[in-house]
Amino acid sequence: MISFQGSPQQSMTKPTIKFFKLLAFGGGVLLLADGAAAQKKKTLTPVAPPPLVRTTTRNETRRLGYGGTLTIIGAPEGSITIEGWSRSEVEVRAEIQLRANTEQDLDRLAAVNGFVLDEDLNHLRILTTGTYDRAFMKAKAKNFPKTLLGLPWKIDYRIRVPMSVDLDINAGRGPIRLAGVEGNIRVSSPQSEVKLEFSGGTLSTTIAAGKVTLKVLGRSWRGVGADIKVAAGDIVLELPAGFSGDLDAEILRAGEIENSYEGLEAREKPGITKQQVKGRMGSGGAFLKLTVGDGRIYIKKQESKL
């Protein structure tokens, strides 16, 4: 079994102490805001990517029962799409893209940049391996050319899982989409546009920079609720007509909350303001908690399907 001591996030932007304290609410996850905002303002001299591109596709299938757990350590760059289906198994389709100056260099990169599957009783792990992971490279590729370590590469994952499953997603930079799954779900990324379509479960999402859109499919949330945090960026909450639930939303520094959902009423002080919402829809229910450091929160009704 390969030992992983790092993750894509550990090789990404590090939070500043200042915003660590700012976003440490309720014993929750700590996030970077100052670093994420600075990352947007930085202007770097563009460097031409290596001319040769190699794209390969790998497919794997493993059995995983309902109520099992899937852990994903994503690549530093790349998308993750997860959809629920009726089978008691996980289907993984990975598109791996490498860039280099020679075919020989591409061969060397292909030997280390990829993923492994690690299986325990009712727990499957998809673990990305590659040049970003110093511990892995030291153990498995001691004489790897240093000139190849910084070359760009990515993995786009498309995964189908049982509809009732727990997910732990530790992603890099790139879009994330989850739909048709219900369980204990945790998502984290340093930079992403996340699209979530759920009707229940326990959802925890932490993004340093980007946008999270949560589309609630039912008129009530089945389960504990959702807790979404974005350090720098936006959160969009799309609710169906007649939804029942409780909502806490807050802007910690700069930005505002835009509410166009007619069914939202004040639950307790301060009620509904541009900086904070403590509200209730319908008869109340599970809590949806939204927190943004710098950015906006949009609360709106879902568009009707024609």
Image (cartoon, rainbow, N blue to C red):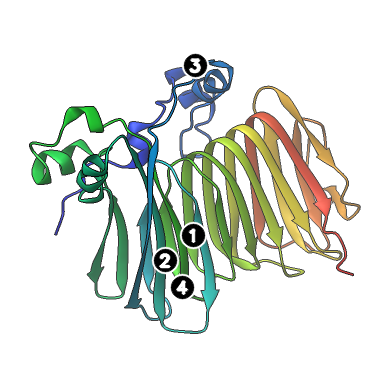
Would you name the residue on which mark 2 appears?
Answer: 93
Point out the frontmost of discs 2 and 1. Answer: 2
- Residue at horizontal 73%, vertical 34%? 296
Q: Earlier in the sequence, mark 2 or mark 1?
A: 2
**Mark 2–mark 4 distance (CA, rounded to whole Å):** 12 Å
- What's the residue type where badge 2 is placed? Arg
Quadrant for the C terminus in the image: bottom right
Q: Is residue 28 visible?
A: no
Residue 79 visible, this orientation: yes
Q: Which residue is tagged 1? A: 185
**Residue 179 rendering spot, x and y as whole percentages:** 59, 65
Sequence-first tag of 1 and 3: 3
Against 108, is 38 above or below? above
How many discs mark residues in the rendered view? 4
Question: What amino acid is labelled 4 in the image?
Answer: Val
Q: Which is in the foreground here, disc 2 or disc 4? A: 2
- The residue tagged 4 is 161
Query: SS of the residue at dot 1?
Result: strand
* CB within 8 Å, label 4 to label 1: no
The mark that comes first in sequence, 4 or 1, is 4
**Distance between the Cα atoms at labels 4 and 3?**
39 Å
Q: Give the crowd class for mark 3: few <14, some 14-19, many >=20 residues within 10 Å.
A: few
Q: CA distance from mark 1 to mark 3?
A: 35 Å
